[in-house]
Amino acid sequence: MSKYKWKDLTKLKSPSMAYDSPLSVLCHIDVNCFYAQVEAIRCGYTKEDPVVCVQWNSIVAVSYAARKYGISRMITIQEAMKKTDKLIPIHTAVFKKGEDFWQYHDGWGPWNPDKDKRLPSSDYKISLDPYRRESRKIFKIFTEYCDLAEKASVDEVFLDIARLCLQSLMCSEQLIPGKENPETIQLMQAKFKDESYDGNQFLPAVPGELKELPFIGDVYNPEDLPLIEDWDDVLFALGSRIAQELRDEIKQTLGYTTSCGLASTKNVCKLASNFKKPDAQTIIKNSCVNTFLDNGKFEITTFWSLGGILGKELIQILKLPQQGSNGYVRENWPTRDSLRKSLSRAVRESPSTSSTIIDASRTNEIADKLYDLVRGQYRVAVTPQTIVKSMMSNKNMTGQACSGLADCFSWLEVFAGELAGRVHELEQEYDKIIRPRTIHILVRAKSGDTHSKSGPFVQNGAKISSQDLLKAGAKLVAELDAKFARGKEHSFYPLININMSISNLDVVDCRKSVIDMFGNQASVQGRQRKANVGNNQSASLANEPFKENWCDECNKTFETSREFQEHADYHIALALSEKMNGTNDCSRRLTFGEKRLLMRRNAPEPPSKRRSKPKSKTAGSSSDIFKYFKKE
């Protein structure tokens, strides 16, 4: 007889409850040296070619072929190239300052002898869009196979494959290819189909014929225990087939190799996927979990969520050894209650400092978590990712990369292109329409002070455009420049950092009507504009009274929002032209039209305010010429 009950097995049918069953089957899959693989496949290299992915002077991903030469991410590209002349460095895609699109410059980078091809960070911004795009392709395959997929990062995912395993167990006519299912399996399948089982009844013993069921991958089994003893082992064997099928699909379709870990909990899955690389699959059976956690590679600080200050503090307070901490906790606190009491007492007796993060009111919660983690029993659900509600494009500046308002505009064009592209790709991924409602600009001045400005964002048309974002962002940064930089340029520029973010993303189903999508736009545009509020360091922006359609620079109020917008656009164009062309009317870079439009010290009246002047009809007037041609 099995130690598991029917209710443990049938619990796997529920996506929201399966993770909590002792028969749960989860897996963690990550793409081996993802960035390097993306670039190698794009450029047509093989896995034997020593490819590294480079960002400025840093190496961000190293192929396994390059690792054979002692190359790691801890060294610069210049140091790496000294180790072998066979190294193939490929720089990430970049945005160029003043451009709203990214591109590759293959062969360019800090190692290039041509100074014009070194991609200085002062003129370029890294683009991660190619990797996000490939990540979406991979994730799409996961979601086509599995109903529960959680994206852990750009190159890794958690999958709950319990329902696929249950389906295979209860619906397959031949669990072992070429062999008819044992009678025990046939009876179980009939009960499952008819729902004639008793949830509290123990499952039958695994039939001997089924113990020949093969695993695909490496089963961690240093003590050489029987591979299949109970139904959890059967499900893991079936799960190894499913995981391998998934990984084969990714390799055949996209060309990427992956590593996979199978276990009953997310923490153990993640440790298992990293245990053997590259292109490997490791299965941790429930009966081998403790042995796996005690293999010398893992401590309590290895666990996801205990790798920071909390884990170090637990080691100090509980006086745990630096090595073998998992087994030590299991041996010294065999019950949950004993660990709770010890941790509570240790926290009370330890001196409290400002750096202490273990709250006395949370000791039971932390003790329970530690108790389960060291036994491989800490159960957390696989949670599908939701659409983000905000996104940012950011640039840390070096030198004179952003030394004036014109430079700000140039970088905003980059940010606008990046954010618009990311929104479009999210729309394709989720088959939704995404409409940001708020735009935010933050700058860190030369002095170290940060200033920010937010405002409503209204896009023109169904699709967001980089020009819409650029226009809205330029208005905000021009206001920041006018308020904090005018007359104080020496302490404001060059900027240390500037970023643009969009938030309050409305997600609309693509099947919605036009009225559903745009019905509230008029009300958004018709609302009174609110004061733009900066962060805590720029609280003065929030406290300042706001005047409708008011220009601080000209000390003037406009009657309508349209007139004010035209006037604001004039200031932006003027500032940009002054930076690029100069303000002297003798400047050779100014065209005749620019001199007429931009050399006037007062802003032109908006078109709606201009009065048409009667034209005197002279012999040479255009009207006479018109009449002349009209006669013919």
Image (cartoon, rainbow, N blue to C red):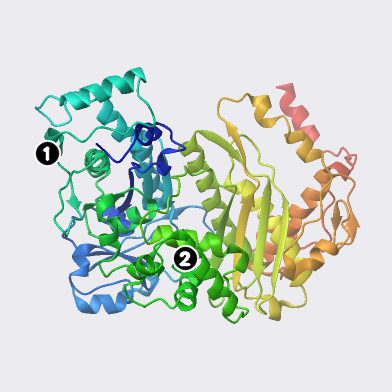
- Mark 1, residue position: 212
Residue for point 12% across, 33% down = 209
Query: From what the image shows, is residue 114 above or below residue 26?
Result: below
The picture quadrant where one finds residue 442 is bottom right
Secondary structure beneath dot 1 equals helix
Q: What amino acid does circle 2 point to?
A: Leu
The quadrant of the image that shows the N terminus is top left
SS at badge 2: helix
Mark 2 and mark 1: Cα distance apart in space:
41 Å
Write down the residue under mark 2. Answer: 339
- Mark nearest the camera among 2 and 1 is 2
Amino acid type at image mark 1: Glu
In terms of depth relative to the viewer, which is nearer, 418 or 519? 519
Residue 565 image label = none
Q: Earlier in the sequence, mark 2 or mark 1?
A: 1
**Is 580 left, or right, of 547 in this rendering?**
left
